[in-house]
Image (cartoon, helix red, strand yellow):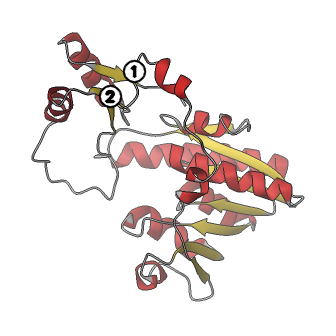
Amino acid sequence: MLVWLDALTSKQGTLLSLIAKELIRLGHDVLVTCRRYEFTEKSILRWGFNPIVVGEYAEGGPTSKVLADIHRMEGLLKVIDRYKPSVLVAYPNPPAARVAFGVGIKYIALTDSPHATIPSRLSLPLADVVIASNCIPSHLISRYLFNESRLIQYNGVDELAWILRTRPKLDEVTRFNLTPYKYVVYRPHEYRATYYPASKLGFSYEDVVKTINNLGFTAVVIPRYSDQVRKALELMRLGYDVRLIWGEC
């Protein structure tokens, strides 16, 4: 059986790659796709898969996001028409879910973000099976489901899948000219996400980096968006002790 796995983010790329490895071990074939967005493609490459990249993340407003989804649906449809998978495995993912539903492919949805209302409403009603951690109250997920869909919950959290399979590598630290135990990783908030509150934070990007430096640590910034990249470069020019990781896996 050919299983299609589609990732929208680097976290999804990591987990779906591990699932793909297990599927291959069980004798299945896999088709891995993703969109162009920060570390997503490289999060898949690092596990030995060459994903088909279809579409990209839109940093603009609602119209830009809808157009990006429309273009991505068109691209995914061409890929699916060529390879003809039997089932889709993905997180809440409107373009992939709509394509799978439209051509009659079963959809197994993974979710850990019932607070992501828009993608959940556009995806989970089309899923045949939804899988989630039992740390999430079932009613937060079942409200999105079609009455014939199945909800399966397991004892654990997604992140353990790669934490248990990964060992720290010193060369990953030294290649960024970092001293072990003397740096703090800073991942700015995903303020462009549809589920993120529109309220302002009580601290700035610069406040966080300055605090990290004042405590004697190097700030390792892993941005999500292009404006966060520009801000990190600006702080470096101002003399802050910052390492920028962008486009790396």
Residue at 83 percent of width and 53 percent of height: 24
C-alpha separation, residue under disc 1 versus residue under disc 2: 7 Å
Image mark for residue 52:
none
Q: Nearer the viewer, residue 19 or 210?
A: 210
Which quarter of the figure is the N terminus placed in?
bottom right
Rendered view: 246 above or below 45: above
Residue at 52 percent of width and 57 percent of height: 159
Rendered view: 28 above or below 218: below
Question: Tag 2's secondary structure?
Answer: loop
- Amino acid, disc 2: Lys
Across and down, in percent, residue 26 comes to 86, 61
Rendered view: 23 above or below 66: below
- Amino acid, disc 1: Leu
Question: Tag 1's secondary structure?
Answer: loop
Q: Mark 2 — residue?
A: 182
Q: Nearer the viewer, residue 213 or 38?
A: 213
State whether residue 247 appears in this view: no
Across and down, in percent, residue 154 comes to 58, 76
158 to the left or right of 80: left
Q: Nearer the viewer, residue 147 or 164?
A: 164
Q: Mark 1 — residue?
A: 178
Across and down, in percent, residue 211 comes to 15, 33
Residue at 74 percent of width and 37 percent of height: 48
Q: Nearer the viewer, residue 81 or 180?
A: 180
Which quarter of the figure is the C terminus placed in?
top right
How packed mark 2 is, by other alpha carbons closer than 10 Å (few <14, some 14-19, many 20 or more), is few
Residue at 54 percent of width and 75 percent of height: 125
Kindly check if marks 1 and 2 are in contact, taking CB atoms under 8 A apart as contact.
Answer: yes
Across and down, in percent, residue 203 comes to 12, 42
